[in-house]
Amino acid sequence: MGVRTEKSAAVWTVIVSRPEARNAVDPDTARELHEAFAEFEDDPTASVAVLWGEGGSFCSGFDLKVAAGLDAATSLSELDPHGNEEAPGPMGPTRLELSKPVVAAVSGPAVAGGMELALWCDFRVMEEDSYMGVFCRRWGIPLIDGGTVRLPRLVGDGRAREIILTGREVSAQECLSIGLCEFVVEPGQARERAEELAHEIAAFPQQCVRSDLASTKRQAGLSVRQALVQEWDTSIHVMAAEGIEGAGRFRDGAGRHGSAPLIPPID
């Protein structure tokens, strides 16, 4: 198997493990990734996921040795997103729209389809010597797993077009400076830092986390007024379900200055 999941309380770390291929994704790995994140979404005990590549590489993209043997008329038609938006993409989960957060922990290359996997995550932790890039540019292979959609939304149209068209390497520090990642850590520390962040997020009331995450995703393309209405419609039931009770706990002295649990302990 090219994918396994390690669980720590409400945090699941989904691991790509094809180090002999720098964690390039073949069809079996894509299917396993898709299944792992579908299971994460459906499991009520899971709150936050981390995506990490074992062996010093996040993911070097789709396995070109496999791609070289594809029949464009048949194999590629099976990946057409028009029919089923929940079906796996070439890289696996990149067409899933999860309600729960996913953090990318990037070591080494996150290039071509691997970059698209990282972009699919909600935010990214990169090691100092890691990098991204549309390396598939040199082989005539286009971005078909969300790269042309998600990259401009993160870094703006002009910068995204330059990165896509040149196919150049984008260092971790540059990624940080342009908003392509949110944290840069020392080599070998991406998974640990991503899991720390995941546990912090998992400690919060989860209906509120998912409501705010959904609103940030759905506001793209809306006017301010439309986005405000959408935010209200997404969030108001959470205020009734969690917010009022949480305000009562604050009133009674819980959670102030970080001195008490943010949520009641689970019996």
Image (cartoon, rainbow, N blue to C red):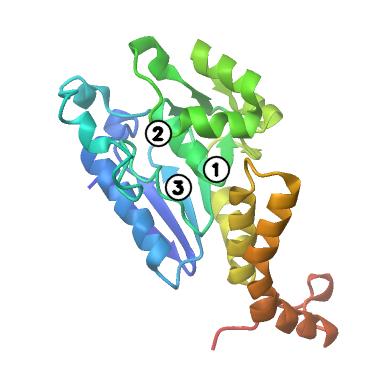
Mark 3 and mark 2 lie on one chain; the one further toward the N terminus is 3
Q: Which mark is residue 32?
A: none
Residue under label 3, please give it: 51
CB of mark 1 within 8 Å of CB of mark 3?
no
Callout 1 amino acid: Ala
Relative placement, left or right, of 133 versus 184 is left
Q: Which structural element holds mark 2?
A: loop
Relative placement, left or right, of 16 versus 224 is left
Relative placement, left or right, of 107 versus 203 is left
Relative placement, left or right, of 256 versus 114 is right
Is residue 128 visible in the rendered structure shown here? no
Residue under label 1, please give it: 190
Give the CA distance from mark 2 to mark 1. Answer: 23 Å
Which of the image's four quarters has the C terminus?
bottom right
Point 70% across, 58% down: residue? 229
Up-down: is 119 above or below 204? above
Q: How busy is the neighbourhood of tag 2: few (under 14 within 10 Å), some, or many (20 plus)?
A: many
Callout 3 amino acid: Leu
CB of mark 3 within 8 Å of CB of mark 2?
no
Q: Which structural element holds mark 3?
A: strand
Residue 57 coordinates in the image, percent (x, y): 42, 33
Give the CA distance from mark 1 to mark 3. Answer: 10 Å
Judging depth in this view, the residue of 86 and 232 nearest the camera is 232
